[in-house]
Image: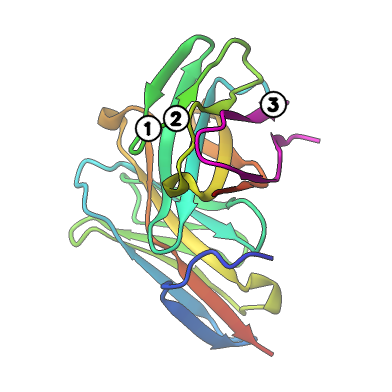
Amino acid sequence: GESVGLHLPTLSVQEGDNSIINCAYSNSASDYFIWYKQESGKGPQFIIDIRSNMDKRQGQRVTVLLNKTVKHLSLQIAATQPGDSAVYFCAENSWNAGNMLTFGGGTRLMVKP
Amino acid sequence: EAQVTQNPRYLITVTGKKLTVTCSQNMNHEYMSWYRQDPGLGLRQIYYSMNVEVTDKGDVPEGYKVSRKEKRNFPLILESPSPNQTSLYFCASSHMTSEGETQYFGPGTRLLVL
């Protein structure tokens, strides 16, 4: 597969540990946030989303936390598995910007067996 | 199977030779968009379309054209490609519900302009 980027921050975790991937955003008008997972050679895949009227949302093994005060978003993956190895992107959307998603630069998660 | 398809997946061309990358979705989504992905820059939106015959510029529209004559298709056109358009391109489609919006991405098209 193709590497997504040469300058991505990388998070390396042991299989079974919890992972926390962080994202900072700058637009205080952003009201909808999404986390995507991109495996090598594939397009981004939706993981979980959260609206600005919430500060936490849980999915299967994943939790997204939103702190609007400091414009910070995090993705927590519980019991990280080798299949979680990928690049993770956060994206933000504000309705006053139409339907345009703005993506963060991405973080590469590497899971050690 | 619900999916977004792109063709071609890989393309090598020369400066100035017009090319089209096709995108098709089978989910009856109103919204479609094109992104390019470059190292260190993440995903940047090129153009998007809210519905048939409705298109608008994204962050980096220069050098690109799009059309939306049918709901399912959203081709990306490079009239006169240049080396700085060498990139990985993704098409996406989405549908808005009360729960929010989920974008479905195509598999990507890797373009090399010599």
Residue in the image at 53% along x and 17% along y:
B67
Badge 1 marks a residue whose secondary structure is loop
Under circle 2, the secondary element is: loop
Q: Nearer the viewer, mark 3 or mark 1?
A: 1
Check disc 2 and give the amino acid type.
Tyr
Disc 3 residue type? Met
Q: Residue furthest right?
A: B1
Q: Nearer the viewer, mark 2 or mark 3?
A: 2
Q: Residues within 10 Å of mark 3 (few under 14, many from 20)?
A: some
Q: Looking at the image, which is closer to me, B78 or A47? A: B78
Q: Which residue is mark 1?
A: B61
Dot 2 falls on which chain?
Answer: B
Instruction: Tell which circle, 2 or 3, labels the residue nearer the N-terminal end.
Output: 3
Nearer to me, B83 or A105: B83
Would you say residue A29 is visible in this rendering? yes
Task: Check the picture and name the quadrant holding the N terminus of chain B.
Answer: top right
The residue nearer to you, when weighing A10 against B64, is B64
Q: Gap in Å between the C-alphas at discs 3 and 1? A: 25 Å
- Count how many numbered circles sit on residues in the image: 3
Separation of marks 2 and 1 at Cα, in angstroms: 6 Å
Query: Which residue is depicted at the point 40% across and 32% down?
Result: B63
- Residue B109 x, y percent position in the rendering: 63, 45
Disc 2 and disc 1 in contact, CB within 8 angstroms: yes
**Disc 2: which residue:** B64
Query: From which residue to which does the magenta span run?
Result: B1-26
> Numbered disc 3: what chain?
B
Residue placed at 49% from the left, 26% from the top? B79
Q: Residue B101 placed where, x, y %?
A: 50, 35
Q: Chain of mark 1?
A: B
Residues at marks 2 and 3 on the same chain: yes
Q: Position of residue B30 (x, y in %)?
A: 55, 20
At label 2, counting other C-alpha atoms closer than 10 Å, the crowd grade (few under 14, some 14-19, many 20 or more) is some
